[in-house]
Amino acid sequence: MQTRLLHQRLAGLFALALLLFNFPLIALWDRDVTLLGVPLFPAALFLVWALLIAALAWLMERGRD
């Protein structure tokens, strides 16, 4: 039961990543704005990528309980 729930959550995280890195949503960040001297587009990509990795790590560590 616990493994099935973990697999469903991982599939949901994968679907979320597909949505976040797909054209309509990723185009929202393509602006001529800088964030601490870094253009917004690469900063947003890196931030979303890092948050997805953190969520994946949290799910995997939580799944062992």
Image (spheres, rainbow, N blue to C red):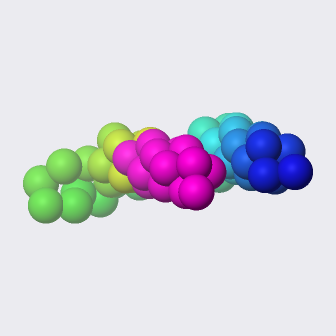
Would residue 23 be found to the left or right of residue 52 on screen? right
Based on the picture, tell me whether residue 51 belongs to the magenta stretch: yes
From this viewpoint, which residue is outermost toward the left? Answer: 37
| Magenta range | 50-65
From this viewpoint, which residue is outermost toward the front? Answer: 65
**In the rendered view, would you say 28 is above or below 50?**
below
Would residue 35 be found to the left or right of residue 4 on screen? left
65 or 4, nearer to the observer: 65
**In the rendered view, would you say 21 is above or below 25?**
above
In the rendered image, the quadrant that contains the C terminus is bottom right
Would residue 64 be found to the left or right of residue 42 on screen? right
12 or 27, nearer to the observer: 12
9 or 16, nearer to the observer: 9
Q: Is residue 20 visible?
A: no
Q: Which x, y percent locates residue 9?
A: 74, 51
Rendered image quadrant of residue 3: top right
What residue sits 71% from the left and 43% below the top? 10
What residue sits 19% from the left and 49% below the top? 38
Q: Which x, y percent locates residue 47?
A: 37, 52
Rendered image quadrant of residue 14: top right
Based on the picture, tell me whether residue 47 belongs to the magenta stretch: no
